[in-house]
Every structure is written in C-alpha cells, then in structure tokens.
Image (tube, rainbow, N blue to C red):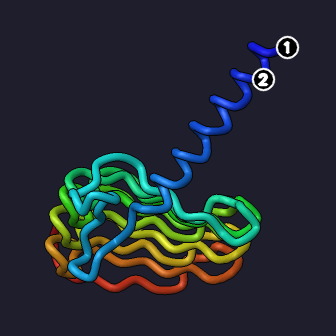
Amino acid sequence: MDQYMKNITTALGLLLLAQWTFAQIGINEDGLYYDEQNNLFTGVYKEYYPNGTLKTEVNLQNGVKDGLVVLYFEDGTKNEVRSFRNGIKHGTWTTWNKAGIKIAEANYSRDKKNGKWYIWDEKGTKRYEMTYLDNEKIGIWYMWDENGKLIKTKDYGNE
C-alpha cells in the first residue's frame, strides 16, 4: 500500500507541476508565445473554458503558430481548424457549426487567399464557390439558393 500511495503522490505532483508550467505559457504583446522563463515556446499550447472543456489548441514553433490551430465550442464540438506556416496563414481553414456541419472552407498560401473557397449554410447546402489567386478574385464564382439551385455566376477572368 505504501508504494501505491507513493506512486499516486508522485503522479499528482507531476500533474500539478505540468499544470503550473502550462499556466505559465502565454502570448506576449509582441504576438509571440513565451514559456515561464521568457523563452519562445515550442510545443502545443492549450486554453480551456471555465468549465474545463478545451477551447483552443495551438501548435507553436519558436513562439509562432506553425501547423494547426483548432478552436472548439464550449460543449467540446470542433468549431474551426486553421493552418499556419511560420506564423502566417498557409493551408486550408475549415469551419463547422455547433451541429458539426461544415459551413466554410478557405485556402491560403503564404498569407494570401489562394485556391477555392466554399460557403455552406447552416443545413449544409453549398451557397458559394469562389476562387482566389494571391488575394485576387479569379475564375467563375458561383452562388446557389437554399435549395441548391444555381442562381448566379460571375466571371473574374481566366485562372
């Protein structure tokens, strides 16, 4: 029984130390994330709602967002996934509503809008399809009504 209590005490101590260390990581006024020794943080930074549910999960490299940032609703449902490379928007960003239905998808490359962008309504019906190249509107943009019927197109030139 003594060994069991030692293991429990050690585990609780490590857990408290991990929570204390975690609590010391944060974003500074320069927009970078630092650890408790004021070093640029590398790892996964997490924030929680007051009820203990995970709110935000941020992958960091040398204090900047690098990889995925995941946002959650207070009930724990995934709200948004964002992608960064070396602190700038790069990759696909996806948003869901509280029912878990995808309502938006956007693509970035080197901090600029690039590629297809889609918007769905709260029921999951695609309403818009757009294309960007280096933040500029290109190609044919589409708009559908709430029943999924194509109602409008606009041509922004060749891709």
Residue 89, percent from left and from top: 26, 66
The circle on residue 138 is none
Residue 20, percent from left and from top: 52, 55
Name which residue lies at 45% across and 65% down: 105
Q: Amino acid at mark 2?
A: Met
Q: Secondary structure at mark 2?
A: helix
Name which residue lies at 25% across and 69% down: 32
Against 65, is 7 above or below? above
Q: Is 56 on the left or on the right of 42, as rendered?
A: right
Q: Secondary structure at mark 1?
A: loop
Quadrant, the C terminus: bottom left
The circle on residue 1 is 1
The circle on residue 5 is 2
Q: Nearer the viewer, residue 135 or 28?
A: 28
Q: Is 26 on the left or on the right of 6, as rendered?
A: left
Name which residue lies at 17% across and 70% down: 133
Quadrant, the N terminus: top right
Asked if the residue under mark 2 is in contact with the one under mark 1, i.e. CB atoms within 8 Å, the reply is yes
How far apart are the alpha carbons under marks 1 and 2? 6 Å
Q: Nearer the viewer, residue 104 or 129?
A: 104
